[in-house]
């Protein structure tokens, strides 16, 4: 059977073009290290890589949230720790003030330190982060947590103006962690201390007067409760930090696992690729030699 020279040439060029395309793909794979250059190379592998990339992106976002949240909780803990020290110091002062042997001048002298502690607690309750958001106002971060009204009667000058809602942060698949604590109980404590300071500031104060003792004892009780309440909040923040640390380690391990899976699915086998590349190069060289030889043949060679 005769084969037209034109038809033979077209077939040879088509074969060479296909081989060159394979060589180009193999060279791109070896230079990039990626086995899959286009979805058609491995549809299933492409889907697996997309899922792994999405999962890794989510894990990285979780870790970013955890890092930011950890800093916020540290800020809360630092200010709460300062509040706890002030309340404990106030408790000691109030315990001394409740001693019936104190003279009016003794009680007057205690008013100054208590007033300073009260002001420190008020400032700590209205602490803000680097962005200017109030830490202890719940979700009303643009509003001071604690408000002071000097025109109000003693015992009601302080009020909590935030809310107790929690700022939930996503730190894992279906896992959230509150990023704030509230200090709504601090308003009552501040008002109690304010009452006590007003009473013991009186030059004629009597440590054994029933009304005076009732205010001092009530303030002492509230300071006791304040110590327990703030300590519990600090403990809760410590537990939250432990949870964040554990989850962050888990996410980091999962990212490493995803990287390994991505390498297995998407990376080229260099030995196999080089073997295939050499095969195609040899095939092309042979094709060129055959083509050259065939084009030199004529019918007269058979006579």
Image: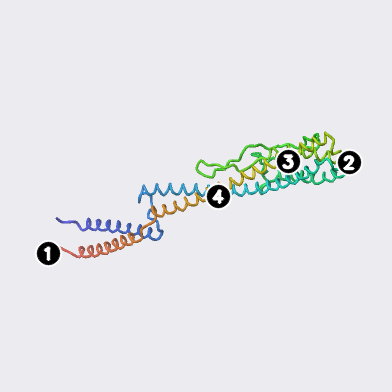
Rounded to the nearest angstrom, the CA distance separating label 3 from label 4 is 33 Å
Rounded to the nearest angstrom, the CA distance separating label 1 from label 4 is 85 Å
Q: Earlier in the sequence, mark 4 or mark 2?
A: 2
The residue identified by callout 2 is: 203
Rounded to the nearest angstrom, the CA distance separating label 1 from label 3 is 117 Å
Front residue of this view, candidates 20 and 51: 51
Q: Earlier in the sequence, mark 1 or mark 2?
A: 2
Front residue of this view, candidates 249 and 93: 93
Mark 1 vs mark 4: give the one in front.
4
The residue identified by callout 4 is: 245
Q: Quadrant of residue 28?
A: bottom left
Mark 3 vs mark 4: give the one in front.
3
Q: At which x and y percent is residue 182?
A: 66, 40
Disc 3 residue crowd, few under 14, some 14–19, many 20+, Cα 10 Å:
many
| Cβ atoms at labels 2 and 3 below 8 Å apart | no
> What residue is at 85 percent from the left and 35 percent from the top?
209
Q: Secondary structure at mark 4?
A: helix
Rounded to the nearest angstrom, the CA distance separating label 4 from label 2 is 55 Å
Q: Secondary structure at mark 2?
A: loop
Query: As drawn, which residue projects farthest toward the right?
Result: 204
Q: At which x and y percent is residue 41?
A: 35, 51
| Cβ atoms at labels 1 and 2 below 8 Å apart | no
Give the quadrant of the N terminus: bottom left
Instruction: Report the disc number at residue 302.
Output: 1
Is residue 37 visible to the viewer in this orientation of the structure? no
Mark 1 vs mark 3: give the one in front.
3
Disc 4 residue crowd, few under 14, some 14–19, many 20+, Cα 10 Å:
some
Q: Earlier in the sequence, mark 3 or mark 4?
A: 3
The residue identified by callout 3 is: 223
């Amino acid at each position: 059977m005769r084969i037209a020279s034109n038809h033979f040439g077209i077939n040879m060029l088509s074969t060479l073009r296909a081989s060159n395309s394979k060589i180009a793909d193999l060279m791109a794979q070896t230079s990039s290290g990626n086995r899959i250059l286009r979805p058609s190379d491995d549809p299933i592998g492409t889907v697996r890589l997309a899922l792994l990339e999405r999962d890794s992106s989510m894990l990285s976002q979780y870790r970013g949230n955890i890092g930011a949240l950890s800093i916020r909780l540290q800020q809360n803990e630092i200010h709460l720790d300062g509040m706890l020290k002030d309340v404990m110091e106030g408790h000691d002062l109030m315990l001394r003030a409740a001693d019936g042997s104190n003279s009016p001048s003794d009680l007057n002298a205690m008013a100054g330190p208590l007033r300073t502690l009260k002001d420190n607690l008020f400032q700590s309750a209205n602490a803000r982060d680097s962005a200017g958001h109030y830490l202890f106002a719940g979700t009303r971060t643009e509003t001071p947590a604690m408000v002071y009204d000097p025109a109000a009667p003693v015992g009601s000058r302080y009020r909590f103006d935030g809310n107790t809602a929690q700022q939930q942060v996503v730190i894992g698949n279906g896992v959230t962690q509150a990023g704030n604590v509230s200090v709504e109980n601090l308003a009552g404590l501040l008002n109690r201390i304010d009452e006590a300071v007003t009473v013991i500031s009186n030059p004629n104060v009597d440590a054994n007067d029933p009304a005076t003792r009732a205010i001092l004892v009530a303030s002492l009780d509230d300071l006791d409760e304040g110590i327990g309440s703030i300590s519990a909040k600090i403990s809760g923040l410590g537990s939250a930090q432990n949870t964040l640390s554990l989850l962050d380690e888990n996410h980091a391990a999962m990212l490493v696992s995803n990287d390994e899976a991505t390498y297995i699915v998407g990376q080229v086998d260099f030995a196999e690729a080089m073997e295939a590349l050499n095969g195609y190069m040899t095939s092309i060289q042979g094709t060129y030699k055959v083509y050259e030889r065939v084009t030199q043949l004529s019918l007269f060679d058979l006579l």
